[in-house]
Image (tube, rainbow, N blue to C red):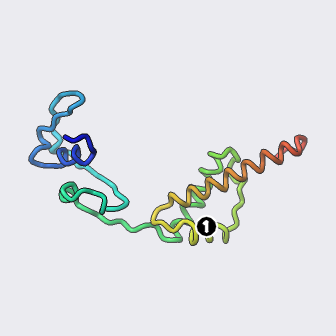
Amino acid sequence: MRGDPSSALLEVLDPEQNNSFRDHYLDVPVDLSNILFLSTANVLETIPTPLLDRMEVIRIAGYVFEEKLVIANKYLIPQTEEQSGVGTERIQMQEDALHKMIKDYAREAGVRNLRQLLEKVSRKVALDLVRQQKANPSNEQ
C-alpha cells in the first residue's frame, strides 16, 4: 500500500481481496465481502481508472432554481441566521434578491456557494446590528 486513499480503496473494493482484508492499524483480518460501499465525487476525471473500474457510477442531476429557492428559504436562511447570532426572522431578504443570488452567483449544481453567500449576508447583518447597538446603547434591538 502506498499510503494514498486510492490504494486503500482498491484493496477494499476488490472482491478477490476484500474477504481477507487486513487492517494495518489494528493488525487484524476483516471480512469486507458483504459490505456495500458508497462513494461520492464531484468530478470523475480525478478518480484513478483502476478504482473507477470497481465502482458503479450513478449520475445525479443538480438542483434546479426552484429547488434551490425552497432549500434556501426552508433550511439555509434559518440556519445561517442562527449561526450568525441574529436569531430567526431577523434577516428579511427580498425574494428578488434571493432569486438574483441563486441565478447569478450560486450557479453550481449543489447549494454550497449559496450557503456561503447567505452566511456572508448573515454575518454582515450581525455586524450591522452590533454597530447599531454600540451607536445607540439605549435602543434595544
Q: Where does the image place residue 88, in percent across and percent down from the top left?
A: 68, 50
Q: Residue under circle 1?
A: 101
* 77 to the left or right of 13: right
Q: Where does the image place residue 82, in percent across and percent down from the top left?
A: 64, 46
Residue 26's image quarter?
Answer: top left
Q: Nearer the viewer, residue 76 or 118?
A: 118
Q: Residue at x 36, y 65 (%)?
A: 60
Q: Residue at x 22, y 43 (%)?
A: 8
Q: Residue at x 14, y 43 (%)?
A: 18
Residue at the far front: name it. Answer: 2
Q: Nearer the viewer, residue 134 or 69?
A: 134
Count of numbered badges drawn on the protein: 1
- Vertical order, 77 against 33 (above or below): below
Q: Where does the image place residue 84, in percent across and percent down from the top left?
A: 65, 46
Q: Residue at x 57, y 55 (%)?
A: 116
- Vertical order, 40 against 66 (above or below): above
* 94 to the left or right of 2: right
Residue 69's image quarter?
Answer: bottom right
Residue 73's image quarter?
Answer: bottom right
Q: Where does the image place residue 51, in percent across and percent down from the top left?
A: 21, 54
* 42 to the left or right of 110: left
Q: Amino acid at mark 1?
A: Met
Secondary structure beneath dot 1 equals helix
Query: Badge 1: how crowded within 10 Å, few (<14), some, or many (20+)?
Result: some
Residue at the far left: name it. Answer: 16
* 108 to the left or right of 104: left
